[in-house]
Amino acid sequence: MNLMLSPADPSIKLSVVVPCYNEEEVLPELLRRLVPVCDTVSGGAYEIIIVNDSSKDKTWPMIVEAAKDNKRIVGIDLARNHGHQIGLTAGLSFTRGQRILVIDADLQDPPELLPAMWARMDDGIDVVYGQRRSRDGETAFKKETAKWFYRLLDKLTDVKIPQDTGDFRLMSRRVLETLQSMPEQQRFIRGMVAWAGHRQEAFLYDRDKRFAGETKYPLNKMLKLALDAITSFSVKPLQLAYLLAFFTAFLAFVMLIWTLIIYFTQATTPGWTSLMAVILGFGSMQMIVLAIF
C-alpha cells in the first residue's frame, strides 16, 4: 500500500486523525473535548479528519453533521470495513498539517494531553508517543496479554518498538512523509513509526477506561495485529523457515538412503524406489526454495 499524501499546507498547524467504527455513543463527547484543545494549541489552524470504517450505526451521519457545523472537520467514509490500521492509514494520507495527532475515538487516550505533547515537540522532538503507566477499565487478561506481546515483540524484532504503547502519538510532517512512503500491505503503524527514526520520546500517561460502547479490538483482532507485527518487523519467522527447510531436506536424504537399502536388500514393488527418490528430492528442494524466496 502506497497512498499519495496530500500536500502540506503551512497555514494548518495541526491535523488530527480519528479512525471510527460504530462510535455513535462516543463521537459527540470526543468532539466536545477535542475541538477546544485543538483551538488552544493551534490558534484555530487545525483540521480533524474522522475516518468512518464502514460503521453499522449512526457514526457516519453524525460525522456529516459535525462537518456541517465545523468546517475544520473532514469526514472520510470507507466503502467497506478495512480495520483500524488501514482506516488510520487512509486518514493520514489526507492530512495537510505540520503536526499530526493520532487518537482513537473511545477517549481512553485523553485529548487534554495534547498541549503537553505539543510543548515537547517545540523542543525539537519529532514523535511524542503515549506510553501507558496504567490501563483503567481493562480486564486482567487483556493487560497481561498486552504486556507479554510487547515483550515478545521486543525479543523478536530488530526495530526497537516502545512497550506499552498504542497509536496515540503526535508526530512531525517529515515522519509522516516517511511513513506514507512505506509500501507495506499489512500495516502496523506504531512499528512503522518506530522504524522511521528521527527524535522520538515517550510521554507517560494513565489510560482511561472506554467512555462508552464496546472495544473494537476483540481477541481475534488482537491476534491478527500481533501476527502482522511479528511478520512485518521480525526476521525470526524467516529463520525458522530456513531451519525447517534444511531439517526436512536432511530427513529426505535419510529416507532416500533407507529406500536404497530396502531396494538392494529386499524385494520391492517395481518403480517404488525411483518414485520415492523423486518425491523426496523434489519435496526437499521445494522447501529450501520457499525458505529462500
Image (cartoon, helix red, strand yellow):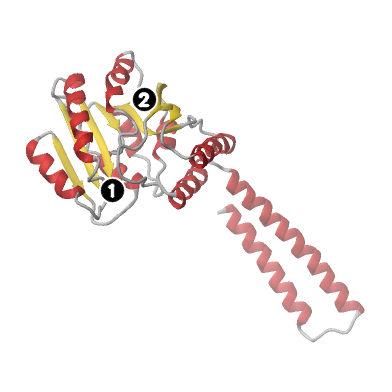
Which residue: 35% across, 44% down? Answer: 85
Q: Position of residue 138 (x, y in %)?
A: 44, 38
Which of the two marks, 2 or 1, is nearer to us in this view?
1
The local crowd at label 2, few if under 14, some if 14 to 19, many if 20 or more residues have their Cα within 10 Å, is many
Between disc 2 and disc 1, whose residue precedes? Answer: 1
* Image disc number at residue 263: none
Q: Which residue is mark 2?
A: 127
Q: Position of residue 49 (x, y in %)?
A: 21, 38
In this view of the protein, which residue sits in the foreground, 145 or 289?
Answer: 145
Q: Secondary structure at mark 2?
A: strand
What amino acid is at disc 2? Answer: Val
Q: Tell me the quarter of the image containing the C terminus.
A: bottom right
Which residue: 15% across, 36% down? Answer: 73
Q: Is residue 149 left or right of residue 122?
A: right
Residue 232 vs 194, above or below: the answer is below
Residue 117 vs 102, above or below: the answer is above
Q: Which residue is mark 1?
A: 21
Q: Position of residue 244 (x, y in %)?
A: 67, 55
Q: In the picture, residue 177 is in which quadrant?
A: top left
What amino acid is at disc 1? Answer: Tyr
Which residue: 36% across, 25% down? Answer: 127
Q: In the picture, residue 212 is in which quadrant?
A: top left
Residue sticking out furthest to the bottom: 270
- Residue 28 visible here: yes
In this view of the protein, which residue sits in the foreground, 271 or 162?
Answer: 162
In this view of the protein, which residue sits in the foreground, 163 or 111?
Answer: 111
The local crowd at label 1, few if under 14, some if 14 to 19, many if 20 or more residues have their Cα within 10 Å, is many
From mark 2 to mark 1, how far is it between C-alphas?
A: 26 Å
